[in-house]
Amino acid sequence: MKKMIGIVLTFVVVQILISTNVINSYLQATLATICINIILAASLNLITGFTGQFSLGHAGFMSIGAYICALILLRFPTLPGFLAGLLAGAVLAALVGILVGLPTLRLKGDYLAIATLGMSEIIRVVFTNLEITNGAAGLSGIPQFVNWFWLYLFSVGTVLLLLNFLNSSHGRACISIREDEMAAESVGISVTKYKVIAFTVGAFCAGIAGGLYASYFYFLKPGTFGFLKSIDVLVIVVLGGMGSMSGSILAAVLLALISTFLQSFPELRMVLYSLLLIVIMIFRPQGLMGSKEISLSTFGKLGKFLSPGKGRE
Amino acid sequence: MEQFLQQVVNGLSLGSIYALIALGYTMIYGIIKLINFAHGDIYMLGAYIGYFCMTILKLGFLPSLLIAMAGCTVLGFAIEKIAYKPLRSAPRIAVLITAIGVSLFLEYGTMFFVKANVRTYPAMTGLLAERYQLGGVVVTMQQILILAITILLMVVLQFIVKRTRIGRAMRATSLDNDAAQLMGINVDTTISFTFVLGSALAGAAGVLVGVYYNSINPLMGMMPGLKAFVAAVLGGIGLIPGAMIGGYLIGIVEVFVSGYGSSMYRDAVVFAILILILIVKPTGILGKSSGEKV
Amino acid sequence: MALLCVKKLTKSFGGLMAVSNVSMKLEQGELVGLIGPNGAGKTTVFNLLAGVYAPDKGTITLTTAGREISLEGQKPYNICKAGVARTFQNIRLFRDLTVFDNVRIAMHQNVDYGLLSAFLHLPSYQREERKLKEESLEFLRIMKLVDKKDELAKNLPYGEQRHLEIARALATKPDLLLLDEPAAGMNPAETAALTELIQWIRKQFQLTILLIEHDMSLVMKICERIYVLDYGMLIANGTPDEIRSDPHVIKAYLGEEVHDA
């Protein structure tokens, strides 16, 4: 299928560029950030953009994935250790997602946002104070297993699986919750169940992103996964368009480039981010893509394939 | 016993600060149903304005306090007009995201201009440096002052809200925006006034913190802001007495957790209280559980 | 056994008694009306039947496929699964989704593949989605909306939005259909068409229908029986002719009779 060819081709081309050092190690780090952010943005989009549940705690799930994967890797510095760590981190993040989701998902809008923020902060405080995570000093020397292959596999995989989900009846059930909870219940959809499903799947993916982060950047500290990180991901989702997967991918790339460009001016970067948020919300709240997906006419079928919750501009 | 009383005294001081900030949160939420994330940063800017008044303009405590309050009112007014007014009819998520944007803008904008390092308030002299010994408990003049100023401001606020026309307009708009407009209330002015009042209180809190705890930095508004919001929710969001009660409760709880438990977990405890309250009684201590009308 | 048996349904909000001691019975296949002045509590009764509110007192029993199911206190989605569908007084469509999606989503409860299949698009997904597509299109065809299947729900003209809401309710394959003021905002021609539609779907889908309406031409024409509600209480129950001449009903709608001087 055209889709598979495109995916494999992209992988090969970039791999070549890496191996020949056209993409040097500095750019590789940017590439890693892009892939990790794509996973984070796509999963947050599922929760917030598609299911309409405003979560400000995504970094909390990421940190669980990161720390669990790191701890397992430090004990078993092998490839199976890495994969096991990745999986364990994601599963634990998902479990916390269920635990947090069940009582809080009945809250609306702002209250849910604050509750998820609170949960994420609690997780951060716990990690800062546990002996095993080495507290505020963090963990270092984490074995690096992540390379372009794994990054690409997981980011493409996450996006494809989420798109599949959103194109299914279960995914549409989630979307209907965003549209009108009461109407969704009246046609037989258990709103609580699907909110929890979206939340849990999102948390799982964030956990994977965390594990990838741990094993690529080989150093973790709890401060990395605070409120600001959740905001980082939120900006990507909002810029790309809440309800558009391709928007999230586009925005992730764009913002990673801006970040890299402004690396020496961290405050300026945040000022720019904050202005971006304000300006988008006032002038173009639907972001770059609204809730449409990129339909590339050259990849005809791919375009149709990418459009789950159609419409809304 | 003495340690217990000392903790209570300390808790009252911290609680006063939280109460002052929480009042702004609760009034703004009451009138436009927005969690003004930027409110904690107005408190931070109040502290900075006070700092510059004292160090550069060499002004005393009271003038600095008043100038900081005035500066914050201007700030709050401007933020409302520029960032929130255009989104009056937008979905709640949009306004919330904008508020987050404003908050970040204030924090990192300040950092950009005055650098991130911690500044220290000049040491207080004279009356403000007094300490009193009551048995084994130490009470400083500053603590008394914080409590006194907070109570004074709260009394003034209550007066404005209960006894003036604009206060009545605030209450009416909180209950029903549309009906208030139909009754001839200028809702825009009322909302601006609410922001002005809330910001003034936050500015006062900023200066008091600068004097009491001495150090300020551009990110100092985030945690207290969040905790003050928890306080507002705890007491009953939208209710002024609720913000006062919530503020003191959170202040005392935090001091006790630090003192008797572990100071490292005090933030987590506050957030745990938030989650608990949202699950058990989201309308807060003083709130009435209103059923949703379909 | 009656399809729906409501006994002494009571609900108050704060101090206000919205519904008081209401008892109703609907036999399989009946088309029954629920009328009353504004504020009488009709939509509250619907909301109690549909599970939006839990009653303070009383029972609601649905008898289908030989089983008796207690509906009071159940969540709306369970009540829908039991076989009760409803429309809303102020249309609640999924406005930013297409007509097609609105109906497809309503069929979700009958779809037979799990999350794993959803993520991986396994054969069960392919098969069920095809079935889903065909059945949804069929519903749209019946309701004469199939040409607009890719149109966003919010872009439909008002009358078609109401039709879509009914189509969506039908897609849940109910035994009992609760229609809340389906003719609101319609002109006489549209109301006449709606009247025919309601009678037609009742026969076609073997439905029992409970209808709230203010438009008396519709009510009197198609309802076999009518319940009349006033201030939360049932004040009359009978055939259209009986209701038309019932003094309590007249008083409730028009006030006391004014005697000639």
Image (cartoon, rainbow, N blue to C red):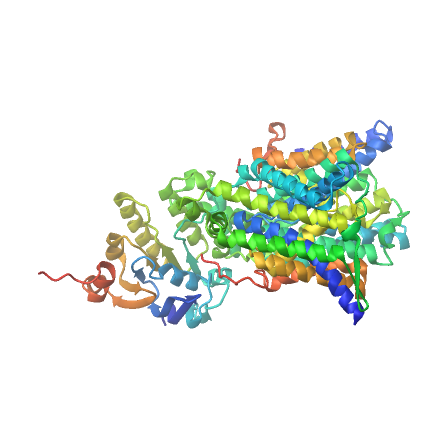
Q: B214 or A194: nearer the eye?
A: B214
Q: How many marks?
A: 0
Front residue (pair A111, A306):
A111
Quarter holding residue B139: bottom right
Residue at 63%, 57% in the rendered image:
B151
Residue B105 is drawn in which quadrant? top right
From the viewer's side, name the closer residue of A31 and C128: A31
Q: Is residue B57 above or below residue C9?
A: above
- Residue B6: image location, x then y, percent: 78, 65
Q: Residue at x 84, y 47 (%)?
A: A220
Residue B36 seen: no
In the picture as drawn, the residue positioned furthest to the front comes out as B126
Residue A81 x, y percent position in the rendering: 86, 52
Horizontal placement of B138 versus C111: left or right?
right
Q: Residue at x 69, y 54 (%)?
A: B17
User: Residue B77 at x, y = what percent?
Assistant: 58, 39
Q: Quadrant of the N terminus of chain A?
A: top right
User: Is residue B110 shown to the viewer in this render?
Assistant: yes
